Image (cartoon, rainbow, N blue to C red):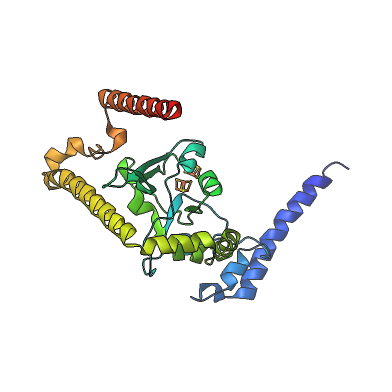
């Protein structure tokens, strides 16, 4: 019969409207109590009627698999053997699979031997471009990049403020354990747990004098780079507001995305020369 569907739809709306008040009466003012679990219940699937969350005074707890921008997992800062050590090995897989290509990684080199070291010297993510797909976290073979739950990242600066560097991205493992306890345990089990032979091997390596020396040298190098960057940024910060105004949108001079076309061309050419040299060496090694 014509109009039955319409009447049913209206009844659903009316029922929600009435249930909202019935629920309000049932809960009274308890929803304003500071330690309420009824808040979680009322905005959950068992809730009756319409329930408005008074954001930002009230916040709905996000589910464990909620994902916002990624962060890098580092060892807990009070870890006995490897405090603050990156889990990331700078393998570059996340940067490759990232659909909008918003990840930029620079691998570390040993300052003594010049050989590559499996940890990132720099790691950037442009969070304005990141589409929160979670591919980077899915594909990372070392569980070193995870999707964060912190969604309040708005700011008035649309330039460098939203390009997160390694310091901004790095968070302790215990943070991941807090926001996603079930997944953290599942992943640890899948890795073979802390007793896994690879984990033990790494722990032994971390204790050797040679590696400690290399770690100290790398930390020193990182400090020097940071100090140079701060020194370069300092005059801008001290400049009077009127003079500083035209330059306020400019990113730091060292930032690779700030290179002009000439610098980019030079970097491309240098990279191609290095690539050709490596290919020639490989061919030479193959011949011999
Ligand atoms: S895939 Fe994981 S280990 Fe590899 S660079 Fe990305 S975060 Fe680091
Ligand atoms: S969540 Fe997706 S878009 Fe964002 S950095 Fe990871 S792969 Fe790239």
x then y, percent, for residue 233: 18, 45
Judge whether residue 99 can be spotted in this image: yes
**Depth check, front residue: 204 or 6:** 204
**Depth check, front residue: 266 or 159:** 266
Q: Quadrant of the C terminus?
A: top left
In the displayed structure, 202 sits above or below 265; it is below
Q: Residue at x 71, y 57 (%)?
A: 14
In the displayed structure, 163 sits above or below 184; it is above
Q: Residue at x 28, y 33 (%)?
A: 258
Judge whether residue 75 can be spotted in this image: no
Residue 174 shown left or right of residue 117 in the figure: right
Q: Residue at x 18, y 46 (%)?
A: 228
**Depth check, front residue: 199 or 179:** 199
Exactly how many numbered labels are in the figure? 0
In the displayed structure, 100 sits above or below 60; it is above
x then y, percent, for residue 181: 55, 66
Image quadrant where residue 242 sits: top left
Residue 24 shown left or right of residue 70 in the figure: right
Residue 73 shown left or right of residue 261 in the figure: right
């Amino acid at each position: 019969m014509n109009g039955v569907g319409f009447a049913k739809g209206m009844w659903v709306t009316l029922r929600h409207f009435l249930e909202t008040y019935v629920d309000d009466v049932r809960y009274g003012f308890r929803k304003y109590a500071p330690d309420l679990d009824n808040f979680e219940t009322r905005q959950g699937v068992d809730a009756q009627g319409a329930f408005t969350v008074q954001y930002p005074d009230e916040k709905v707890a996000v589910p464990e698999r909620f994902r916002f921008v990624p962060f890098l997992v580092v060892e807990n800062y009070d870890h006995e053997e490897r405090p603050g050590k990156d889990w990331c090995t700078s393998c570059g897989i996340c940067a490759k699979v990232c659909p909008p290509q918003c990840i930029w990684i620079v691998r570390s080199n040993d300052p003594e031997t010049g050989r590559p070291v499996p940890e990132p010297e720099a790691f950037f993510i442009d969070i304005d471009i990141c589409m929160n797909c979670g591919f980077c976290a899915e594909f990372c073979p070392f569980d070193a990049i995870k999707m964060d739950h912190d969604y309040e990242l708005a700011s008035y600066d649309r330039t460098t403020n939203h390009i997160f560097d390694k310091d901004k991205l790095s968070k302790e493992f215990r943070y991941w354990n807090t926001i996603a306890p079930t997944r953290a345990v599942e992943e640890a089990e899948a890795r073979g747990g802390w007793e896994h032979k690879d984990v033990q091997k790494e722990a032994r390596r971390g204790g050797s004098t040679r590696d400690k020396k290399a770690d100290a040298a790398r930390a020193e190098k990182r400090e020097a780079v940071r100090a140079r960057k701060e020194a370069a940024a300092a005059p801008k910060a001290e400049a009077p507001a009127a003079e500083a105004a035209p330059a306020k949108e400019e990113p730091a001079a060292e930032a690779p995305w700030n290179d002009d076309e000439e610098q980019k061309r030079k970097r491309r050419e240098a990279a191609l020369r290095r690539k050709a040299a490596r290919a020639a060496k490989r061919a030479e090694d193959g011949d011999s």
